[in-house]
Amino acid sequence: MTEAKFANPAPLGLMGFGMTTVLLNIHNAGLFPLSAMVLAMGVFYGGIAQVIAGVMEFKRGNTFGTTAFTSYGLFWLSLVATWLIPGLNSPAGGKTPEAFMGWYLALWGVFTFFMWFGTFGKNRVLQFVFLSLTVLFCLLAARDWTGSAEIGTIAGVEGIVCGLSAVYLAMAEVLNEGKGRPILPIGESRM
């Protein structure tokens, strides 16, 4: 009896993360106002699709993938909730204070920093995604703590790079697996 082969869920999770991150950071860079498009992507592709990918990684026995995709999927859902719940008579009676939002982002930065260590021994593009995401969370927290529009713009540009790196890795995994050979290089680890 042959063992069932499961599809690789990482490209789904990476695309959900990457495309949503790019869209939000186009806003953070000051190019467009925040809109329902970003909120919808945050709920459905950044949020729900990543949680699904995380559950699929669980079935494959991948603790790192499970933790990363479910956590960042829930990050997107909780982020959108922080924007929407204040309009629904939140316990605080209004919008989340920016300084407190800075702590939310900083905690995600700490989590991401430790997850970055989990990428050691994996491909270089994945290492870059997590390192650049750590930097992004730090910049966004600094923006909210200082109120600096300049830091926000820098964070937006850096976030676009981070998101595009995840999109690249997703497409590399799909194409490389589909063709059975490297089409897009990802810097495979030698460990």
Image (cartoon, rainbow, N blue to C red):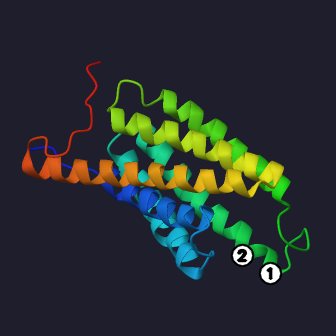
| Residue 63 showing in the rendered view | no
**Judging from the image, what secondary structure is the residue with disc 1 in?**
helix
Q: Is residue 189 above or below residue 21?
A: above
Q: Is residue 120 left or right of residue 32?
A: left
Mark 1, residues whose alpha carbon is within 10 Å: few (<14), some, or many (≥20)?
few
Is there any visible trace of residue 165 in the rendered image? Answer: yes
Q: Is residue 104 left or right of residue 165?
A: right
Residue shown at 23% from the left, 48% from the top: 172
Comparing 9 with 23, the one in front is 23
Q: Position of residue 70 (x, y in %)?
A: 51, 52
Q: Which residue is mark 2?
A: 84
- Using the image, determine if residue 164 lies above or below residue 40: above
Kindly check if marks 2 and 1 are in contact, taking CB atoms under 8 A apart as contact.
yes
Q: Residue at (62%, 67%) from the top-left corner?
A: 30
In the picture as drawn, the residue positioned furthest to the top comes out as 191
Label 2 to label 1, Cα distance in Å?
Answer: 7 Å
> Which quadrant holds the C terminus?
top left
Numbered disc 2: secondary structure: helix
- Mark 1 is on which residue type? Leu
Residue sitting nearer the eye, 94 or 35: 35
Q: Residues within 10 Å of mark 2 (few under 14, many from 20)?
A: some
The image shows residue 62, relative to residue 70, as above or below, that is above
Q: Which residue is depicted at the point 26% across and 38% down? A: 186
Place of residue 182 in the rendered image (x, y in percent of width and height, measured from the top left): 13, 41
Residue 88: give its label.
1
Q: Position of residue 31 (x, y in %)?
A: 57, 70
Q: Amino acid at mark 2?
A: Leu
The residue closer to the viewer here, 98 or 90, is 98
Quarter-of-image position of residue 53: bottom left
Q: Quadrant of residue 38?
A: bottom right
Image quarter of the N terminus: top left
